[in-house]
Image (cartoon, rainbow, N blue to C red):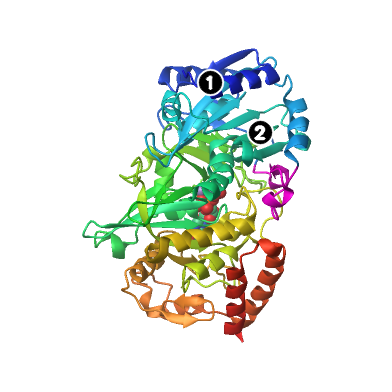
Amino acid sequence: MTNNKNVLNWVDEMVALCKPDKVVWIDGSEEQLKALREEACSTGEMLKLNEEKLPGCLLHRTAVNDVARVEGRTYICTRNKEDAGPINNWEDPKVMYERLTKMYDGVMKGRTMYVIPYCMGPIGSKLSKVGVELTDSIYVVLNMDIMTRMGVDAFKQLGDTSNDFVRGLHSKADIDEEKRYIVHFPEDNTIWSINSGYGGNVLLGKKCFALRIASYQGKNEGWMAEHMLILGIENPQGEVKYIAAAFPSACGKTNLAMLIPPEVYKNKGYKVWTVGDDIAWMRIGDDGRLWAINPEAGFFGVAPGTNAHSNFNALESTKKNTIFTNVVHNLDDNTVWWEGLDKNPPKNALNWKGEKWDCTDGSKGAHPNSRFTAPAKNCPCVSPKFDDPTGVPISAIIFGGRRAKTAPLVYQSRSWQHGVFVGSIMASETTAAATGAVGVVRRDPMAMRPFCGYHMGDYFGHWLEMGKRLGDKAPKIFNVNWFRTDDEGHFIWPGFGDNMRVLMWILDRCEGKADAVETPIGFEPKAEDINIEGLGDISVETVKGLLDVDKNLWKEEADGIEEFYKTFGDRLPKELHDELDTLKANLK
Ligand code: GTP
Ligand code: MN
Ligand code: MN
């Protein structure tokens, strides 16, 4: 499949280490994939679902101890410890290679090693990059087929002599959580993952490559790899403007990326197009603007809560050729179910653990972090630019998270530099997407806390540098919060499709068409400039409340930021200290 000596030598080396019984090169052909699906179903690793209702769909259950990303066991191994800090776990690469080499030694005896060539980004794009993942899991092969451009084309993209590919090695080993490691060696273009079978830990093209390794490459090569969705809004004249938005895991990227415009906009002819729902790679184009591609080819979305109302387009995307992980198996018609799909949980079913389940005991049937892996081309609103090698130009960048109180519905930064500050102080209540407590506020700068492959202070510096290069062509930067609650803890803002009302103000700001009022934290809309036509429960007064900036809460916030900033030491750019001083002065 390839004559590239760098690939061949490395595969030989890893085969010698892992000692699989058999090595299979994945060419991406339908014939080969069909055989793998059949094999996985015959061993029980996957389960074939109802061919009429869910054609080409499969169900998989992970081990009970292996249901989410494990940040505590995720490492960035750089030669200098400081280069990984202060948030990432670190270990000396020599020590880590030695420790893991022992664990990989002979780990694939009795198993098959699959060699997966894949391309992140459209084939033929200068923005794309190639990886090769070695794995002993058919589940990984079948997911990588959906999530990436997998097969011989990836080797064509790499060429016969290039050494610029990410070397990924994965083994399920014994799924032993005590020995689970998700390890990145950014300086060697290498990822080693062992003892897990959960998507975020084992689909090495996604978080491991497209964010952790790519963010490091982007810093060195002058581009950006971000935890961002990309969407296009088409106006009635047919012009499309693109927005990139970073929210922490399970905070609404997939939902926003596929939103359905509310009637007020739909009736006028507005349309929304999905370019990406999780990751954006962005470079400065020949025209000086910031251009983005989605390096992925599919959606690895959170299942619970996905329904025909909350995210019709995501649900449609899962109707064929989709892999479901850790959802409920409806035994009556061999389909799937999850909390929030509809109000009719199946009576005759197995829960995500494979136990008999009928919802009467109050337990959840699907794991809160259960997922679907769906091809992007299934999505009714997939952008015509999805495969465009040049990507799309970005007008606005949005940050956001779950904040019950502090953050207002929307505000705009005063400048790129202030926007970098706004991104750097992002905080969100934790979700089930990672193991650990849920609902605790933690700082998650640019939604990259778990995904930045180098020192976060240097990462802020890189953002500032990109802004200098972009100059007056830089996208405008905003912050949103769909999650403000009332005294009973209910969300005030309707969210989902209605978030478009906020996006419209954002685009109007980018085009100089909307007014703003200055607040201590940045520019806000006038409450009456958020279109609430057709929103029964929401009045201008409610919007005013949602936009309220509580100075006392923000003073506490400023103290929290100061504490957080201290952890960066002298790697925190001076510009951000200046912005914090400005915030404090504004709050006096
Ligand atoms: P990752 O794929 O893990 O990076 O997460 P994500 O950012 O794509 O999150 P996703 O879109 O899957 O949203 C997860 C949760 O947020 C679901 O429970 C949604 O119901 C909820 N959610 C999304 N958008 C909104 C919104 O506008 N308002 C409210 N209240 N909830 C929302
Ligand atoms: Mn994500
Ligand atoms: Mn998502």
Q: Dot 2, crowdedness within 10 Å: few (<14), some or many (≥20)?
A: many
Using the numbered discs, state the Cα–Cα distance from disc 2 to disc 1 in whole angstroms: 21 Å
In the image, 319: left or right of 105? Answer: left
User: What is the secondary structure assignment of the residue under circle 1?
Assistant: helix
List the residue tagged with mark 1.
Answer: 5
Asked whether 217 or 343 is in front, the reply is: 217
Q: Determine whether, in the image, residue 497 is placed left or right of residue 400.
A: left
The x, y position of residue 174, in whole percent, is 73, 27
Residue located farthest toward the left when viewing the structure as drawn:
237
Q: Are marks 2 and 1 in contact (CB under 8 Å)?
A: no
Tally of numbered tags:
2
The numbered mark, 2 or 1, whose residue comes first in the sequence reads 1
Quick one: SS at disc 2?
A: strand
Circle 2 sits on which residue?
192
**What residue is at 70 percent from the left and 53 percent from the top?**
85
Give the magenta-colored segment's residue range: 68-91
Rendered position, 166 above or below 410:
above
Residue 139 in the image: x percent, y percent?
56, 28
Reply yes or no: does residue 201 show up in magenta.
no
